[in-house]
Image (spheres, helix red, strand yellow):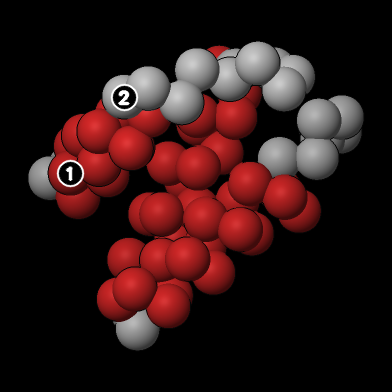
Amino acid sequence: MADLRGLHSKNLGGGFLVGLEKTGNILQAGLYGTVSASLAVENMGALIPLEGLRDEAERRLEEIRNQ
């Protein structure tokens, strides 16, 4: 499967690095990367609604932590 949108390199990687910096835990960093990529898949272009984005990211992070 081709990654035509660059999710792996940009969003997954960026989210992973933020998670690693915040938690120091490689597994938790992977969850941050997953959340970042999931948000990117749903929103295209420069007009991503920022209002409520952090809350949604934190909700998703908590959801996958509890799986």
Residue 67 in the image: above or below residue 20: above
The reply, left or right, for residue 27 in relation to residue 17 is left
Q: Is residue 29 visible?
A: no
Q: Secondary structure at mark 1?
A: helix
Q: Nearer the viewer, mark 1 or mark 2?
A: 2
Quarter of the rendering containing residue 58: top left
Q: Which residue is rendered at x = 33% and y = 37% of the image?
A: 54
Location of mark 2 (residue): 52
Q: Nearer the viewer, residue 64 or 54?
A: 54
Residue visible at 58% across and 20% down in the picture: 48
The kind of residue on which mark 1 rests is Glu
29 left or right, relative to 37? left
Disc 1: which residue: 62
Which element is circle 2 on? loop
C-alpha distance separating marks 1 and 2: 15 Å
Residue furthest to the bottom: 24
Picture quarter with the N terminus: top right
